Image (cartoon, helix red, strand yellow):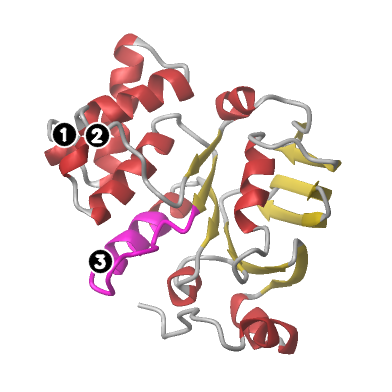
Amino acid sequence: MSEMLEVRGLSKKFGNVVTAENVTFDVREGTALGIVGPNGAGKSTLLSLITGVLPSDSGTITFDGQNITSLSAASRTKAGIARSFQIPRPFVDMSVFENVYVGATFGGGFHGQVGYEAAVRALETTGLMHLSEKPAGQLRLLDRKRLELARALATNPRLILLDEIAGGLTEKELPPLIELIRGLRDSGVTVVWIEHIVHALTAVVDELMCLAIGRVLAIGDPQEVMRSPEVIEVYLGSTFDLGEAS
């Protein structure tokens, strides 16, 4: 199994604030990497660096064997990298289908019938087809999360980056979302998933990485990472959900 994503020495500062410091890790094709860490650890910034929304100060990013460090965000999307955001911001007056079609067209570069079919596949994958004509502004939170994921999937990614997609959901709403993400991984899509609900991550991911102050504190087997004394120290007093996997 080859490496889908290789990050080497990635660093980023905003003035005197370090958000990424010599970050190095790999993600194998068709696997899922979970990322945890306290608020301000640099988790979302890392996703922005990988997608090209933010330029890095130093380091390299290799995607499927190609150095993409200097590519634009749009070029990285067309190469096969997609991202969902922590707070869903759909076009509220547009239908669910129209929202996903926008993702297929402007994100994936798919037009006409090809774009239509990409949007339909994304809706079917996320279980939103029955809501396709509903205005996005009328969706409940779980379905807004699904829509955010569907818009990303409509670009036909090989690597998808998820930023706290389970945030705000109830325990009853978590299992279907976990199954959806597990299904993406099992279908061959490589997943990088930031989440505060650790038991949701450990139900899906093959490896877990902990970030603290922009640095990789630990990476490896999820249970071993969560038992690491350094990781436990970082989480003392936190509100992280370390409950049993669903």
Q: Name the residue located 58 percent from the left edge and 66 percent from the top edge.
A: 206
Please say whether residue 169 is one of the residues in the magenta stretch: yes
Whole-Å distance between the Cαs marked 3 and 1?
A: 21 Å
- Quadrant of the frame with the C terminus: bottom left
Q: Position of residue 86 (x, y in %)?
A: 45, 52
Residue under pointer 1: 135
Relative placement, left or right, of 70 versus 157 is right
Residue 239: x and y, percent?
49, 81
> Do the numbered discs 1 and 2 sit on residues whose CB atoms are within 8 Å?
yes
Using the image as rendered, state which of residue 15 and residue 11 is in the foreground: 15
> Sequence order check: which comes first, mark 3 or mark 1?
1
Cα distance in 3D space between marks 2 and 3: 22 Å
Q: Secondary structure at mark 2?
A: loop
- Tell me residue 19's x, y (percent): 74, 55
> Residue drawn 67% across and 58% down?
42
Instruction: Work out whether 164 lies above or below 89.
Output: below
Quadrant of residue 199 within the rendered picture:
bottom left
Write the start and end of the magenta stretch as one range: 163-182
Q: Quadrant of residue 119?
A: top left
Q: Nearer the viewer, residue 239 or 170?
A: 239
Quickly name the residue at label 3.
Answer: 173
Q: CA distance from mark 1 to mark 2?
A: 6 Å
Circle 2 Cα neighbour tier, 10 Å, few/some/many (<14 / 14–19 / ≥20) = some
Cβ–Cβ below 8 Å for labels 2 and 3?
no
Question: Could you tell me how many numbered marks the image carries?
Answer: 3
**Viewed as shown, does residue 147 lie left or right of 192?**
left
- Which amino acid is tagged 2? Val
* Residue at which label 2 appears: 92
* Helix, strand or loop status at disc 3: loop
